Image (cartoon, helix red, strand yellow):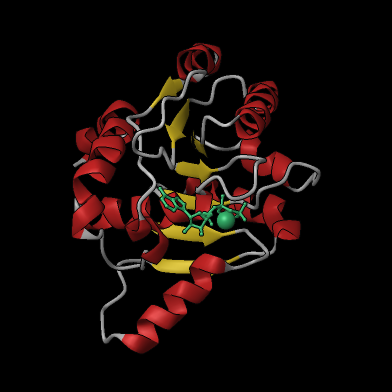
């Protein structure tokens, strides 16, 4: 199952949630998974390399750094892979190499926030996704909600996004999300992260992975 974490908006939280959701699948669900870093910034791969040097931890999973230019080949190779493969994409849209990744995704997780610019970019992104891969389930993950802020456009935004997919439980803006590593889910954000990730797992992955085992 190819799970693609994507949004054309930069800085929406793709890499953060790609890492944490991978940690969740491994630690909370006991899954063997593979993580593919297709972002030219290689944030996940370098975090994973640093974590392995710093701590003597057994890695939870393998991280493979892939040049987006090779996306067609890589997606073809993944066709018969049955374990969850979590893929991090760069925050852009003007690259044809993204097409095969979106076309062959089995699930798309799209972190976003309710500010006007991000919402608009997310809405356009969702239209493109549905054009390329009409059947793929899309989960929008509201990210970086600030305590005490009344998001007046929230209900309207949710209505517009629900045309394309589901809205997961919200994630707050918390510093702990800025210090994620590739082997844990920080305790102070665990409760909240698990609520969102359980929503995704239970709705889109459980049937596939728990019938098999
Ligand atoms: N819920 C959150 N609370 C606080 N900070 C967050 C949260 N989510 C993400 N961040 C921070 O926001 C910044 C952007 O997040 P991240 O790198 O995950 O976004 P991205 O979508 O992968 O960006 P890019 O498009 O550049 O790949 C990072 O500094 C990250 O630590
Ligand atoms: Mg990123």
Q: Is residue 20 at all visible to an observer of this figure?
A: yes
- The residue depicted at 72 percent of the width and 39 percent of the height is 99
Question: x and y percent of residue 191 in the render?
Answer: 19, 45
Q: Quadrant of residue 198?
A: top left
Quadrant of the frame with the N terminus:
top left
Q: Quadrant of residue 128?
A: top right
Give percent across and percent down for residue 23: 31, 58
- The front one of 143 and 54 is 143
| Depth check, front residue: 201 or 189 | 189
Image coordinates of residue 10 in percent, x first then y, are: 64, 48
Is 27 left, or right, of 80 in this rendering? left
User: Relative to residue 189, is residue 96 drawn left or right?
Assistant: right
Looking at the image, residue 205 lies above or below residue 181: above
Q: Quadrant of the C terminus?
A: top left
Q: How many numbered tags mark residues here?
A: 0
Q: Is residue 192 left or right of residue 176?
A: left
Q: State the residue at coordinates (25%, 51%).
A: 189
Nearest the eye: 2 or 155: 155
Q: Residue at x 75, y 48 (%)?
A: 97
Q: Position of residue 61 (x, y in %)?
A: 35, 66
Query: Can residue 33 be seen at all in this image of the molecule?
Result: no
* Residue drawn at the location 18% of the way across and 58% of the way down: 187
- Front-lying residue, 30 or 113: 113
Q: From the viewer's perspective, is residue 175 above or below residue 92?
A: below
């Amino acid at each position: 199952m190819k799970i693609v974490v994507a949004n054309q908006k930069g800085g929406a939280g793709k890499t953060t949630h790609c890492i944490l959701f991978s940690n969740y699948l491994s630690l909370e669900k006991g899954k063997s998974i593979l993580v593919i870093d297709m972002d030219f910034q290689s944030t996940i791969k370098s975090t994973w390399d640093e974590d392995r040097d710093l701590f003597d931890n057994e890695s939870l999973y393998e991280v493979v750094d892939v040049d987006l230019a090779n996306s067609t080949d890589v997606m073809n190779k993944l066709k018969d892979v049955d374990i969850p493969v979590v893929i991090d994409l760069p925050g852009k849209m003007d690259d044809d190499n993204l097409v095969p990744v979106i076309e062959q995704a089995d699930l798309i997780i799209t972190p976003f926030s309710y500010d006007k610019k991000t919402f608009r970019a997310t809405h356009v992104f969702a239209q493109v996704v549905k054009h390329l891969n009409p059947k793929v389930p899309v989960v929008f993950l509201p990210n970086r909600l600030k305590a005490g802020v009344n998001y007046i456009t929230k209900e309207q935004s949710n209505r517009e996004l629900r045309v394309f997919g589901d809205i997961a439980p919200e994630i707050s803006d918390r510093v702990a999300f800025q210090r994620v590593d590739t082997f844990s889910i920080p305790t102070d954000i665990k409760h909240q992260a698990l609520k969102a990730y359980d929503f995704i797992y239970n709705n889109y992955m459980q049937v596939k992975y728990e019938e098999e085992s």
